Amino acid sequence: MSNPELSLIIPVYNEEKNLSIFLESLDVLYYKLIDKGINTEIIFIDDGSKDKSISLIKAYGKGKIIKHKRNLGYGMSLRSGFYSSIGEYLAIIPADNQFDAQDLYEYIDYRSRNKIVCLYRAKRKDSWLRKIISYIYRSLLLFKGLKIKDPNWVKIIPKRLVKDLKATGPFIDAEILFRARKIGVNIISFPVKHYERRFEKAKGFSLHTIILALRDVIRIIKGVKN
């Protein structure tokens, strides 16, 4: 794809059972974007999957594939995707089918160099523990002046906001949002349907991930002024 305007950033980690459905939805989204005249590239980041995820992505036949030799986590997957992207805009999409990829099309016209489009889970289909952790996380961000309903969900971001990021863990989304607020980029939010995970366990909730998040929070929030 020459001169893409939009890069779809898709982290993947052991999603073999979810990918067949996800790739069908992604294909619908991709061709809708192309038909609309939006040149689009797809970037898969396989974060050290131990199942057949990489084989299914290769068989799909579209997009660039970045493969981590070992599992580096969500933040590093996004960084790999961001820095390999060409598009002026970046869309972060999970591959676990808890978001229907083709639903992104409804919000694509809101993209702007001076705007981040944040989609939030209207009715979260997660465990009570994940909801509690999410509430604490949002409360911390609110304490530092960032009011956002769902900082770690699907977004459309101007690429200019992802240069020289410090975070390497789950706090990477919040770092981008803090940066947007600092330079006057508007953050707009829309509710989207959230689906229950049908296969595999939810990722990003290990002790290692929590430690990474806390480290990034301390490192970055120290420099954030309300």
Image: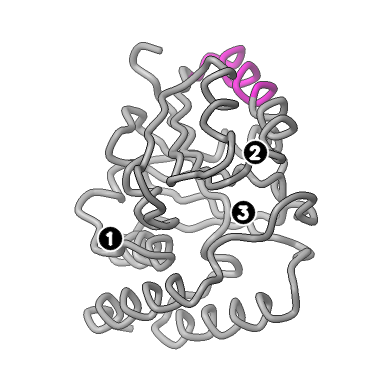
Q: Residue at x 68, y 77 (%)?
A: 131
User: According to the image, what is the colour scheme of the structure?
Assistant: one colour
Give the left or right position of residue 117, taking residue 168 as reference.
Answer: right
Which portion, as a residue range, is magenta? 27-38
**Among numbered discs 2 and 3, the one appearing first in the sequence:** 2
Q: Dividing the image into 4 quarters, which one contains the N terminus?
A: top left
Q: CA distance from mark 2 to mark 3?
A: 25 Å
SS at badge 1: loop
Q: Quadrant of residue 107?
A: top right
Give the image location of residue 140, x and y in percent: 47, 85
Q: Amino acid at mark 3?
A: Leu
The residue at which mark 3 appears reads as 119
Residue at 60%, 76% in the rendered image: 134
Quadrant the C terminus occupies: bottom left
* Residue picked out by circle 2: 16
Q: Residues within 10 Å of mark 2 (few under 14, many from 20)?
A: many
Whole-angstrom CA distance, mark 1 to mark 3, is 21 Å
Tell me where residue 5 sits by quadrant. top left
Residue sitting at x 58%, y 60%: 203
Q: Secondary structure at mark 3?
A: strand
- Which numbered disc, 1 or 3, marks the residue closer to the eye? 3
Residue topped by disc 1:
183
Disc on the earlier residue, 1 or 3: 3
Q: Is residue 144 above or below residue 220?
A: below
Counting from the top left corner in percent of width and height, residue 69 is at 35, 43
Q: Give coordinates of residue 173: x percent, y percent.
A: 42, 61
Q: Is residue 13 left or right of residue 70?
A: right
